[in-house]
Image: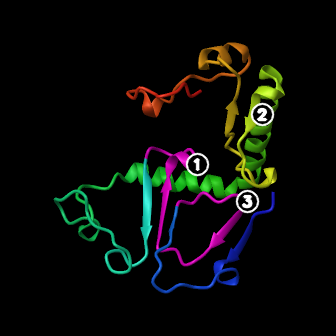
């Protein structure tokens, strides 16, 4: 996979007063631009449970205000001692991703494509709809957005048909919630 880096000025007219907040989730093109804010979550690249926020001109060009109060760490934006081991772990995880990006991308792409083929095989092509807007080649390699359609199909019934796929009818991050439907 070729990763292309391009300057946003080549494609967009600059807007002086606009704030640009980027979540770091591009498809196959990484865009270098005049980002006002950028946040990175460890879950995006399997780092430790920590994230970071880049804010250009924090407090001046960007409206960043403290949520917690106490010590004046980080120029008064947050109290408390930095979690140095987690910060170092985040940096190391980012380094590993940058160093191995092509092989990670290729592996995730193979796994996603295999999952999609298995879903079609186990459930039947008429019951599986892959929700992808635009070209299928532009899908993220680590993301499979799929709908399973069929009258009376429950999450448990879908899972029982997929003997070789490990899944659940909920998400760990929403374990305390009572879902309105039956997500898998």
Name the residue carrying label 3: 28
Residue hosting label 1 = 45
Nearest to viewer (mark 1 / mark 2): 2
Does dot 3 land on a helix, a strand or a loop?
A: loop
Residue furthest to the front = 151
Q: Nearer the viewer, residue 27 or 156?
A: 156
> In the drawing, does residue 146 fall left or right of residue 66?
right
Q: Is residue 180 left or right of residue 82?
A: right
Tell me the quarter of the image containing the N terminus.
bottom right
Q: Which residue is denoted by mark 2 in the rendering? A: 116
- Taking the magenta stretch, the answer to whether it contains residue 124 is no
> Compared to 160, does 143 lie above or below?
below
* Residue 184: % across, % down: 59, 27
The residue at 69%/36% (across/down) is: 146
User: Which residues fall within the magenta stretch?
Assistant: 23-49
- Estimate how packed mark 3 is, as few (under 14), some (14 to 19) or many (20 or more) residues with alpha carbons within 10 Å: some
Residue 184's place in the image compared with 74, above or below, is above
Tag nearer the camera, 3 or 1? 3
Find numbered disc 2 in the image and state the secondary structure of the residue it sits on.
helix
Q: Earlier in the sequence, mark 3 or mark 1?
A: 3
Q: Write down the quadrant of residue 27 in the picture.
A: bottom right
Residue 71: x, y in percent? 18, 61
In the picture, residue 68 is in which quadrant?
A: bottom left
At x 81%, y 28%, the residue is 126
């Amino acid at each position: 996979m070729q990763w292309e880096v391009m300057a946003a000025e080549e494609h967009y007219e600059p807007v002086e007063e606009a704030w640009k907040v980027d979540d770091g989730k591009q498809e196959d093109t990484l865009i270098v631009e005049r980002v006002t804010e950028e946040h990175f979550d460890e879950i995006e690249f399997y780092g430790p449970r920590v994230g970071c926020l880049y804010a250009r001109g924090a407090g001046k060009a960007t409206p960043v205000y403290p949520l917690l109060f106490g010590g004046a760490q980080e120029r008064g934006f947050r109290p408390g001692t930095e979690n140095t081991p987690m910060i170092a772990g985040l940096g190391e995880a980012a380094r590993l991703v940058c160093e191995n990006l092509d092989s990670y991308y290729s592996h995730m792409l193979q796994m996603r494509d295999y999952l999609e083929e298995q879903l079609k095989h186990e459930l039947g092509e008429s019951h599986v709809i892959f929700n992808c807007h635009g070209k299928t080649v532009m899908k993220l390699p680590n993301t499979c957005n799929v709908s399973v359609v069929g009258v009376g199909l429950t999450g448990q019934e879908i899972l029982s048909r997929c003997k070789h796929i490990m899944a659940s009818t909920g998400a760990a991050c929403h374990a305390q919630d009572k879902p309105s439907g039956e997500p898998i």
